[in-house]
């Protein structure tokens, strides 16, 4: 009989959990529905009325009417869900199925457009169709993640037909698009599985936690009721003794609170936490088990405190404390200073500590509501381990603090664990940073130049300026000091020196008075309001013709303020200075950005050249096709062999650069340099 009731409770709990999960999934899908419906309506109207010419043929009009009917039915379905179905706990599974039918029907309608009209579409219409359907498929990663079947089916129905049509097309450029489409299909398939699995797990875990909390609350109420009954039956003498003990405990607690607790957050203070940590470290030694210490610093709190006042700031700290405390045992979390917190995790190895740290960071990033304001914070977290890193509580805190500071300054925002390599790296970085501050005045910087040759007749078309640093007779690579210069703000001063030096050198090149000099520019320089003025001053003081100056920017530059970057690039081109995209295909790689930005050259990254005998060739050919369509010339980097040079030239690459022609040389060596390769085909 007991076994029957246990089984019944289990089935009941599972059923409740499934219904809640289905309802959350349906709610998430329908909340994103209007966006997809509106975008699909606009896109279908654009395809039929916007780019089809002055007259619209009847088949396309029929197709537009067909998809419009589907979208209208989806709107009706969405309205019904919002007004009725969403209020029923048992309607979640049906809601997911209804939404799936609407989404998949829309995808099928789009696939019908591609299959029936593919051979009628000109290149512009085809490219727009590819962009629209790829955007739909990409956007569905988050919009449809609540239903794995819907997310995968929607993406595959959109992408597979157009990819297959391209593969079996008679036109070479459409075949290339088909190859890229197949690769995109595979990527979309894998990403959809991961995204939907993550979302489903999150929904399941959320509802499971809610059930567990409800059960815990019932258990607490039951215990409270039992305790109350016991107190009622106690004798007067026992009641008196209990009251006396409670009074002693209360007064003891008051004394403890005054000396060991932070008055705002009620967490243990610095003194109490350090003392507690010492005991925990001793216990970890006795138990032969690791202990992790988390040092947490809030990002963005100072701005809130300064702009909105200390009252709001205090409320924020209280809410953050509650979120941190949810991941720690009693008296294991403490307030260190201001917006800094510590959490001790006994019996936790590095993997466990990292998981808890990530969970705390995620919790802190959730919106905080104070006095009608929605506020947002993030956290930098450093982790130190005992006994692996230290047996001293004070030193362990210092190491965790040091790790947190390093993590705060890095691009990787994940929590970080202390290591001896990190300690040495911080010390080395500090030494290099101090050296950077004086490198220009001590004349430690110098430029090397690497020729860029025409693929057709092997003539030096331009020379790329590469910054080198001799720091106390030790060569420091640009991959080491450039990131430090960018983080410290020194890149503006260093970049100005490079630009001036390169222009002056190029002006005095007697061996080739037509060759251009190519200078790399960081996003920090481009975003600077004074960059254009600096550019004009360099050209004016050096006397170099603007046509002989080229600027190279990486793809990652376009992730920043797109409007500002575009304005800067337009001003640069207005001065007849050419612009190259460096490392194309390895970074942001957005075709929409490439077609909208003023660019003259596309540099093919060395990684694709190295793999030219493999998949690199297809990527290079695709890049060449895109560049030609956008009236850009191409430069292949990292050419190291004669075979690579011949192959790239045969493909139609305009310019070649690499060790096969010459290594980077100092300016004085350019004068005596003679290209020994009269022809790459010799």
Image: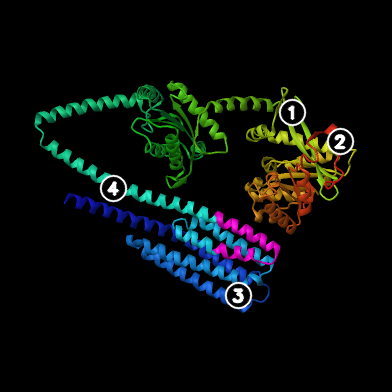
Q: Mark 2 points at which residue?
A: 673
Where is residue 423, by image quadrant?
top right
- Looking at the image, how many numbered discs can be counted on the residues? 4
Q: Do the residues labelled 2 and 1 touch (CB within 8 Å)?
A: no
Confirm whether residue 82 shows in the render: no
159 left or right, relative to 30: right
* CA–CA distance in space, label 2 to label 1: 27 Å
Q: Do the residues labelled 1 and 4 touch (CB within 8 Å)?
A: no
- Tell which circle, 1 or 4, labels the residue nearer the N-terminal end: 4
Q: Which residue is drawn at 82% across and 38% down?
A: 503
Q: Mark 1 points at which residue?
A: 440
Q: Name the residue under label 4.
A: 214
Q: Neighbour class for label 4 at 10 Å: few (<14), some, many (≥20)?
A: few
What range of the chain is rendered magenta? 158-187
Tag nearer the camera, 1 or 3:
3
Residue 600, placed above or below residue 502? below
Q: Name the residue under label 3.
A: 60
- Tell which circle, 4 or 2, labels the residue nearer the N-terminal end: 4
């Amino acid at each position: 009989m007991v076994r029957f009731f246990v089984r019944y409770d289990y089935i009941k709990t599972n059923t409740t959990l499934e219904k809640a999960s289905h309802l959350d999934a349906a709610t998430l899908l329908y909340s994103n529905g209007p966006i997809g419906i509106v975008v699909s309506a606009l896109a279908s109207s654009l395809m039929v009325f916007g780019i089809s010419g002055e007259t619209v043929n009847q088949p396309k009009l029929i197709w537009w009417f067909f998809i419009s009917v589907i979208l209208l039915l989806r709107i009706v379905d969405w309205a019904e869900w919002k007004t009725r179905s969403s209020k029923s706990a048992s309607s979640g599974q049906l809601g997911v199925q209804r939404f799936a039918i609407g989404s998949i029907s829309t995808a099928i309608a789009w696939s019908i457009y591609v299959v029936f009209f593919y051979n009628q579409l000109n290149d512009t219409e085809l490219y727009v169709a590819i962009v629209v359907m790829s955007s739909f498929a990409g956007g569905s990663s988050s919009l449809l993640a609540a239903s794995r079947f819907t997310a995968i089916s929607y993406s595959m129905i959109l992408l597979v037909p157009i990819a297959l049509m391209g593969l079996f097309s008679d036109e070479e450029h459409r075949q290339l698009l088909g190859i890229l489409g197949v690769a995109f299909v595979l990527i979309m398939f894998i990403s959809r599985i991961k995204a939907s699995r993550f979302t489903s797990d999150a929904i399941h875990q959320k509802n499971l936690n809610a059930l567990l909390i409800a059960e815990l609350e019932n258990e607490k109420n039951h215990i409270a009721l039992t305790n109350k009954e016991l107190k009622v039956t106690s004798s007067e003498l026992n009641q008196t003794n209990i009251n006396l003990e409670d009074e002693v405990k209360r007064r003891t607690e008051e004394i403890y609170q005054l000396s060991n607790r932070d008055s705002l957050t009620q967490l243990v203070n610095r003194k109490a936490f350090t003392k507690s940590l010492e005991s925990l470290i001793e216990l970890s030694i006795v138990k032969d088990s690791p202990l992790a210490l988390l040092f947490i610093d809030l990002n963005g709190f100072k701005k809130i405190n300064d702009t909105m006042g200390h009252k709001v700031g205090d409320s924020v700290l209280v809410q953050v404390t509650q979120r941190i405390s949810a991941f720690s045992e009693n008296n294991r979390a403490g307030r260190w200073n201001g917006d800094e917190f510590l959490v001790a995790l006994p019996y936790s190895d590095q993997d466990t500590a990292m998981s808890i740290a990530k969970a705390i960071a995620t919790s802190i990033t959730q919106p905080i509501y104070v006095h009608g304001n929605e506020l947002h914070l993030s956290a930098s977290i450093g982790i130190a381990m005992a006994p692996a890193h230290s047996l001293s509580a004070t030193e362990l805190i210092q190491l965790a603090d040091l790790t947190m500071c390093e993590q705060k300054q890095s691009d990787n925002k994940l929590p970080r664990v202390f290591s001896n390599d990190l300690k040495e790296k911080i010390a080395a970085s500090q030494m290099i940073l101090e050296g950077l501050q004086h490198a220009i005045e001590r004349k430690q910087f110098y430029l090397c130049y690497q020729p860029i040759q025409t693929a057709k007749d092997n003539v030096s078309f331009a020379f790329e300026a590469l910054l080198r640093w001799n720091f106390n007779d030790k060569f420091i690579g640009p991959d080491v000091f450039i990131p430090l210069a960018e983080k410290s703000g020194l890149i503006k001063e260093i970049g100005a020196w490079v630009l001036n030096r390169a222009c002056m050198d190029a002006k005095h090149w007697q061996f080739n008075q037509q060759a251009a000099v190519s200078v790399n520019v960081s996003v920090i320089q481009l975003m600077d309001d004074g960059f254009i003025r600096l550019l004009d001053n360099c050209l004016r003081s050096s006397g170099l013709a603007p046509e002989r100056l080229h600027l190279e920017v990486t793809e990652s530059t376009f992730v920043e303020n797109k409007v500002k970057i575009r304005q800067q690039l337009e001003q640069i081109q207005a001065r007849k200075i050419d612009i190259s995209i460096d490392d194309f295909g390895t970074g942001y790689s957005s075709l929409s950005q490439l077609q909208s930005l003023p660019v003259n050259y596309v540099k093919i990254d060395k990684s694709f050249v190295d793999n030219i005998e493999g998949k690199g060739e297809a990527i290079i050919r695709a890049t060449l096709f895109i560049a030609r369509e956008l009236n850009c010339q191409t430069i292949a980097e990292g050419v190291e062999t004669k075979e690579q040079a011949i192959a790239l030239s045969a493909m139609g690459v305009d310019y070649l650069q690499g060790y096969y022609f010459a290594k980077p040389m100092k300016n004085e060596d350019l004068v005596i340099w003679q290209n020994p390769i009269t022809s790459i085909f010799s």
